[in-house]
Amino acid sequence: MDKSSRQSTTELAELSELDKQLINLLQRGLPVAERPFLAIAEQLNSSEDEVLERLNHLMTSRVLTRFGPMFDAVCLGGAFTLAALAVPENRFEEVAAQVNSFDEVAHNYRRTHDFNMWFVVGAESEAEVNQVISSIEKTTALPVLNTPKLEEFYVQLYLPA
């Protein structure tokens, strides 16, 4: 594969200096405050309205695809697992819709592997996770590979804009 064939065809978004600062700041967390976006605006020498407008713009233009809290289900008394399915290609969209119909499925993504569909199941207990997996197996008529977490590692991902 030559270098030119590896280049992405995705267009790069043009980010203002405020966009970059906002993205960088939000990766470090959201202030615990009555008006967290006002607190962010003050750090950026901006206004709360402008911060909210730029954040909405970044979301609608798909520069950011997700903005929301991340909870540690285990610390909250719950359980989660990473699971996978080997889905026949001609059934992929059908099975994706079936898997995504479960409230306990946090996200679902395609991989180029025999196990081509991976998803996270989060529930109030390990027993409930296992019930959801059994229900997914019944619904899809496919066996689920369940890979529960054995050990947790914290890697702080930070992608400066």
Image (cartoon, helix red, strand yellow):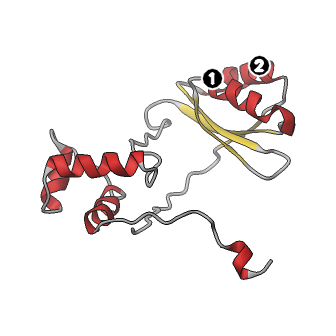
Residue that numbered label 1 is attached to: 101
Q: Are marks 2 and 1 in contact (CB under 8 Å)?
A: yes
Q: Nearer the viewer, residue 108 or 104?
A: 108
Task: Check disc 2 and report the residue beneath it.
Answer: 139
Residue 76 on image: x %, y %: 43, 33
Mark 2 neighbour class, 10 Å CA radius: few under 14, some 14 to 19, many 20 or more = few
The quadrant in which residue 101 appears is top right
Query: Is 17 situated above or below 35?
Result: below
2 or 1: tag closer to the N-terminus? 1
Seen at 79% across and 24% down, the residue is 140
> Taking 37 as reference, is 58 left or right?
right
Q: Secondary structure at mark 1?
A: loop
In the displayed structure, would residue 27 be above or below residue 83?
below
Q: Where residue 153 sits: x, y (%)?
A: 54, 57
Element carrying mark 2: helix
Q: Looking at the rendering, in which quadrant would you find the C terminus?
A: bottom left
Quadrant where the N terminus lies?
A: bottom right
Q: Position of residue 88 (x, y in %)?
A: 87, 36
Name the residue rendered at 76%, 27% in the picture: 94
Q: Is residue 75 above or below residue 15?
A: above
